Amino acid sequence: MVSCAILPLSMTILLSGCSRSDESDPVATGKSILRILRASNTDELKGDVDLYSPTSADFERLNKKVLANPNNSAALRNRGNAYFHSDLPERYKLALDDYNKALSLDHGNASWYSERSSVFDNLHRSDEALRDVNKAIQLDGSESRFYFARASINSDLGRKKEALEDYARAARNEKPVGLYTLDLSRELAKQGKESEALELLNKVVSQNHDIWAADAREERITILISQGKFGQAQKELDQWKAETPENSNAFEISARLHQLLGAKDKARADYRQLVKIRTSEIDEQNSKNAIDYEFRADYLEKVGEAKKAAADRRKALALYEVEVRESPSKELDSFSNRAELYDKLGEHKKAALMRAREIELSGIAISKAPNDFDGYFSRASIFEVNKKYEQALRDYEKIKTLKPDDNQFIAYHADCLNRLKRYQEALDECKGGLKKGTINSEYLFGPMAEACLRLGQYDEAVKYATSKISFDRTVGDAYFWRSRAYEKLGKKDLAQRDLLLSKWYESDAVE
C-alpha cells in the first residue's frame, strides 16, 4: 500500500493532541503544523484561540471580533489560524479566505505570509505556497523559520539542492543546535549523505538534554538501521537506555529491534520497562487520555498479561465515550481507534458497527462539502482499511477530477488498482503521472514498484523501489517490494536485508 513515513515518537505525541484522524499525508501535515508553530506570534494568540484544537467557544469569540471590526487584521488572522487547526470539512479553504483578508489589510507581515504558505501547502497548491514563503523571506530574511518552510516545500517538490541550502540556512545560527539542525540532518540522510547527518546528530545529542537530544538519538538509530547496521544501532540504544531509564522512546525502539532480530527475552524485558514507565505516567498525571491506556495495553500483551491488557482497552473505550459525549465533533476521529480496540478484544461485530458508522458519517461530511477532496480521501482511507477497494477506487477517481495533476492522488488510485490486481493499469497510470509533472512524483514510485514486481519486471521494480526509498527511507512497503525483486534476481543477501527493513518499518505488504 502507499505508505507514509513515521514521524519521530516525540512529534507523534505532539500531533496526537491535535487529532486522532488520519490526514491525507501525516508527514506533510506534521511539517505544515511545524511551519505554523514556528511562524506564529504568540502574543497575538494569548487568550484568543487554542492553537491545537479550537472549540466552538473560540470561534464564537473570534467571529464577534471580526464582526465588530471587519478590518481587524489580527482577528482575521487568528480565526484563519483556528480554522487551520479545526476539524471542519473545509477548514483549509476557510483559513485561506481569512488569511487573504488579513494580508490585504496588513501586507507587510512576514509571519502571516509564512502561515498562509502552510495553508496553500495543505491545499496542494505548491507554487502558491512557495510564492508566499519567498515573500516572507523578502520581508524578513533573518528568520530561520522561513528558510525551514521553504526548504520543506522544496524537499516535497524534489528540489534537493534548494532544499538542502535552505535547511542549512535555517540551522546556521541555531545555538544550541537543535530543531533546525535535526531538519538539516534528515535532509542530508534523505539525499544519501548519512555520514554528514550522523555527525550533525552527534552535535545535537552532545549539546542538548531535552526533546531534541531524544529525537537526534532516534534519528541516528534510524539511519543505522536503514544501513543494516543493527548491532551498532542496538549498542547506541543500550547506551541511551542506561542514560535515560525513564525514556519510553529508547525502550520502545529497543524492544522492536530485539523482536526483529529474534531476541525475544530481551524484547520482553524492554516491554516490562515500558509497562512501568507508562504506569508511572498514568498514575502521576491521573491520566484521562485513552491513548495512554492503549499503549500500556499493547505492552502488557507483549509480556503475557492478557487480562490486564483487556482491562486497559476497556478503560480506553470508556474514555473515548466520555470524550465524544463532551465533544461530539470528535466522534468521527475516534471511530478507527475504537474499532481497533474492539477487534483486539475479540468483539468483531462491534468493530464492524464502528467502521460502518464511520463510513456513514464520512458520507454525510462529503454531502455537505462535495468539492472538498479531504472528505473523499478520508472515506477512501476507511474503505481501504476495510479492504473495500472498489469503493475506495471510486472515491479516488472523484479526487482525481478535483485534483487532476496531483501525483499523490494518482498514486493512491494506482495503489487501489494494485489491490484489485490490475497491475498494468496501475503502472500505466503512474507513468502518465510522471509525464504530466514532477510534483509529488515520489508517491508514484511505490505503486510502480509493486506493479513491476507483479508483472515480472524485476529490475524495474528495484529501480522504482529504490527511487521511493531515496525520497523516504522509512517506507516499509518499498523495502518489501525491492526484497521480493532481489529474491527473483537471485540477490539473496540484499533480499534478506530489505525484508528485515520492511518489517522494521512495518510494511503492510509483508506476507
Image: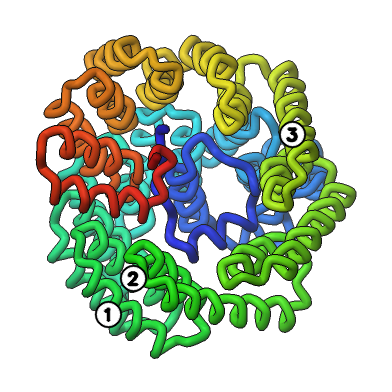
Q: Is residue 234 above or below residue 424?
A: below
Disc 2: CA contacts within 10 A as few (<14), some (14-19) or many (>=20)? many
Q: CA distance from mark 3 to mark 1?
A: 43 Å
Position of the C terminus by quadrant = top left
- Please tell me which of labels 2 and 3 falls first in the chain: 2
Left or right: 149 with respect to 382?
A: left
Could you tell me how far apart the alpha carbons at marks 2 and 1 are, in whole angstroms?
15 Å
Kindly report the distance in space between the C-alpha atoms of the residues bearing marks 2 and 3. 40 Å
Amino acid type at circle 1 is: Lys
The quadrant holding residue 127 is: top left
Could you tell me which residue is drawn at 33 percent across and 10 percent down?
A: 425
Residue where numbered disc 1 is placed: 235
Choose mark 2 or mark 1, whichever is in front: 1
Q: Earlier in the sequence, mark 3 or mark 1?
A: 1
- Three-letter amino acid code of the residue under disc 2: Ala
Q: Quadrant of the N terminus?
A: top left
Query: Are there few (<14), some (14-19), or many (20+) residues within 10 Å of tag 1?
Result: few
Q: Is residue 310 visible?
A: yes
Q: Is residue 434 left or right of residue 122?
A: left
> In terms of secondary structure, where does tag 2 sit?
helix
Left or right of 10: which side holds 285? right
Residue at the image position 78 percent from the left and 65 percent from the top: 311
Tell me residue 479's x, y (percent).
27, 43
Which residue is more in the foreground, 450 or 268?
268
Q: Are marks 2 and 3 in contact (CB under 8 Å)?
A: no
Foreground label between 2 and 3:
3
Q: Is residue 363 above or below residue 351?
A: above
Check disc 3 and report its element: helix, strand or loop: helix
Q: Amino acid at mark 3?
A: Ala
Task: Using the rendered view, name the quadrant where residue 466 is placed.
Answer: top left
Q: Which residue is mark 2?
A: 216
- For disc 3, the marked residue is 352
